Amino acid sequence: MIDFYYAPTPNGWKVAIMLEELELEYTTHLMRLGDGDQFKSAFMAISPNAKMPAIIDHDPPKSYGTNSVSVFESGAIMLYLADKFKRFIPTDPLGRKEAMEWMFWQVGNQGPMAGQLSHFVNYAPKDQQDYGRKRYGGEYERNLAVLEKRLGGQDYILGDYSICDMIVFPWAFIAKPLSASLDLFPNVAAWRGHIKQRTAVMKAINLCKADQNLGKTNVSNNKILYNQSAVHILGSGNKE
């Protein structure tokens, strides 16, 4: 059994997709990020960065010992699960090398740039959006172009459906809410269309769907989730 600490965001969807594709049993712990659940001591013991997603695996591989194992950061969680079940990741050295490249591209490029764009489109003060939307909108499109070239002549990032498609998909899935068009990226549009029809993906996207933020909690009405500083980690005052 796996405890899954989650909120319905693109980063949460990544791991939800992996769990559903593996058909694993898991218990979802919905994180109320606007209320500061991520800063509670019990959660920060699992995820020191005070970010979801995170998991606790109560039946880890024997090489990890007999205790439950916690994993934080979406890429680390997905790699842990792929290795544990030996699915959705190449086993040959060259294939694994390529998988690592595209996973690190996602967590170091596509995800952060899309996340910043989402902030300025959906949550920043209206009178402070222009530069951020231009800056991160350009970066988001640049990453779409990288993905477009990679998908030329093949259906999926590594050729076959893999952990890389699962981790990249969520931030491409929400292109329209980010005010981005896929007209210049037909390969990405086709790839996105194929993946969103998968049963596991649909289940993941719909997990706790009613609890999506959709801009309701934003900079103007929440000081817990936005404009964080060291105080949030070193002395949040929320130690339950």
Image: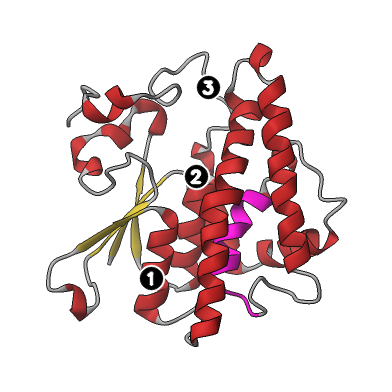
Q: Mark 1 or mark 2: which comes first in sequence?
A: 2
Q: Mark 1 or mark 3: which comes first in sequence?
A: 1
Q: Which structural element holds mark 3?
A: loop
Residue 216 occupies quadrant = top right
- Residue 44 drawn at (x, y percent): 24, 41
Residue 82 occupies quadrant = bottom left
Pick the front one: 141 or 187: 141
| Amino acid carrying mark 1 in the image | Leu
Residue 181 occupies quadrant = top right
The numbered dot on residue 8 is 2
The residue drawn where x is 49% and y is 38% is 211
Whether residue 215 is visible: yes
Q: Is residue 161 magenta?
A: yes
Is disc 1 in contact with disc 3, using a CB cutoff of under 8 Å?
no
The residue drawn where x is 34% and y is 77% is 84
The numbered dot on residue 81 is 1
| Amino acid carrying mark 3 in the image | Asn
Is disc 1 in contact with disc 2, using a CB cutoff of under 8 Å?
no
**Relative to 105, residue 160 above or below:** below
- Residue 16 drawn at (x, y percent): 47, 58
Q: Mark 3 or mark 2: which comes first in sequence?
A: 2
Q: Is residue 56 left or right of residue 132?
A: left
| Amino acid carrying mark 2 in the image | Pro
The span picked out in magenta is: 160-172
The residue indicated by pointer 3 is 218
